Image (cartoon, rainbow, N blue to C red):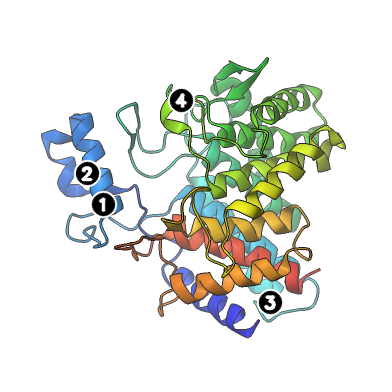
Amino acid sequence: MENFKSSFFKLKIYCEQENFAGWDPYDGLNSKFFQVLPLKKWDLARLAWIQGFKRSPINFRPLFGVPKEHNNMGLGLFLSGYCQLYEIAQTGNHQFGSAEEIFTKIKYLSDLILSYQSKGFSGSCWGYNFDWQARRLFLFPAHTPNVVVTAFCTEALFEAYEITKDNKLLETALSASEFVCNDLKRSKVKGGFLFSYSPIDGNNTVYNASLLGAKILLLNYKYTRDEVLLDLSKEAIYTAVKGQKQDGSWVYGLLPIQNWIDSFHTGFNLNALQLYVEITGDHGVVESIEKGMIFYLKNFFLENGMPKYYHDRTYPVDIHCPGQLLITLNKLEKFNEHKELANRVLNWTIKNMQDDKGYFYYQLKKRWSSKIPYMRWSNAFMFSAMSNYLLATHGK
């Protein structure tokens, strides 16, 4: 247990010293060098540039002028993590910070999130701080809002509102339902629909993205009791349930190139279904959660605690995978039941994926690995995950 706390403090100090800003696996197009080249208008060049930065074990970002920046999803993860720490402090346990110190961080991160909202849409929404080219299918310009970032920011703002009682946070979080209802597309699937990833066409049939849209509506329904939001979220939830395979798994999406099954998106799905049960009292999806949880725990973690990205092969080992386990076990109230697994996975992750400087690595691969300190993907995610772990072990 002591090594877990020491690991967390090292991570916390690193992130605070960096002011929660940093690089991202997909931020290659933020390069000042690339932005002056005519190649930036060619989709293949953009894709190659992004993938080159993402796949390289050497960090070329300083050389090519990629700045460290705040990432909205990272800020949402940090804010959520500090809210977990505040809950611990409220029990009288101040070893992770006093309530006053943590409150200051919550206020600071909340204000940052409010300041980075995307403009020109029906409701509150957020995107990434970089242009993102997904294969050759679609380009999302920087700050184009998407449901994933919006969901993480919205949930964190609701959590922060419960602590600060700042009505600006509540109003902003509630407004996100307008973005989901009015700006996201709905693809008809299995007698229901899936919410799109973004207002821009392309990623329209991804299960975890649709469930995150439903999650935003459910969190809003909890405060407003708006039956329209409930009905929409229920339809999206049950569409995802119908898309679940008999073994309890979900493919990532419905495009031919999206038929993989991975660990952390499975966790996203399970968290959304659990939230639906908690808020609505509808137990019609409990069997789906149970099947999904069995598949998740059976297929994505080795006996020694090593986490897997895909269900059918070991590598790469991605830092999201151990992080999501800690969050999922806590959110589904399964932590005590699977505490030994959580400890094994966290211990393996600290031993193999945390740098002496405190940050966590992005991915381990069989031949070469990326140990670049990505703030959103690696460190914000593990900060939130370890805060969930600490809440489960110290705050309840």
Give the residue type at disc 2: Trp
Q: Position of residue 171 (x, y in %)?
A: 68, 39
Whether 293 is drawn above or below 139: the answer is below
**Marking on residue 255:** 4
| Secondary element type, mark 4 | loop
Q: Which residue is mark 2?
A: 49
Q: Are marks 2 and 4 in contact (CB under 8 Å)?
A: no
Viewer-nearest of discs 1 and 4: 4
Sequence order check, earlier mark of 1 and 3: 1
Q: Identify the mark at residue 134; answer none if there is no mark.
A: none
- Describe the element under mark 1 as helix, strand or loop: helix
Per the image, the residue denoted by label 3 is 98
Alpha carbon separation for disc pair 3 and 4: 48 Å
Marks 3/2: CA distance? 44 Å
The mark that comes first in sequence, 3 or 4, is: 3
Residue nearest the observer in this picture, 38 or 268: 268
Q: Secondary structure at mark 2?
A: helix
Quadrant containing the N terminus is bottom right
> Which residue, given by chain and number where applicable, does mark 1 sit on?
53
Contact check, label 1 and label 4, Cβ < 8 Å: no
Q: Residues within 10 Å of mark 4 (few under 14, many from 20)?
A: few
Q: Is residue 29 left or right of residue 106?
A: left
Q: Position of residue 12 (x, y in %)?
A: 52, 72
Quarter of the image that includes the C terminus: bottom right
Depth order, front residue of 74/47: 47
Q: Nearer the viewer, residue 308 or 181?
A: 308
User: Is residue 166 at all visible to an observer of this figure?
Assistant: no
Residue drawn at point x = 56 percent, y = 39 percent? 150
Q: Is residue 245 visible?
A: yes
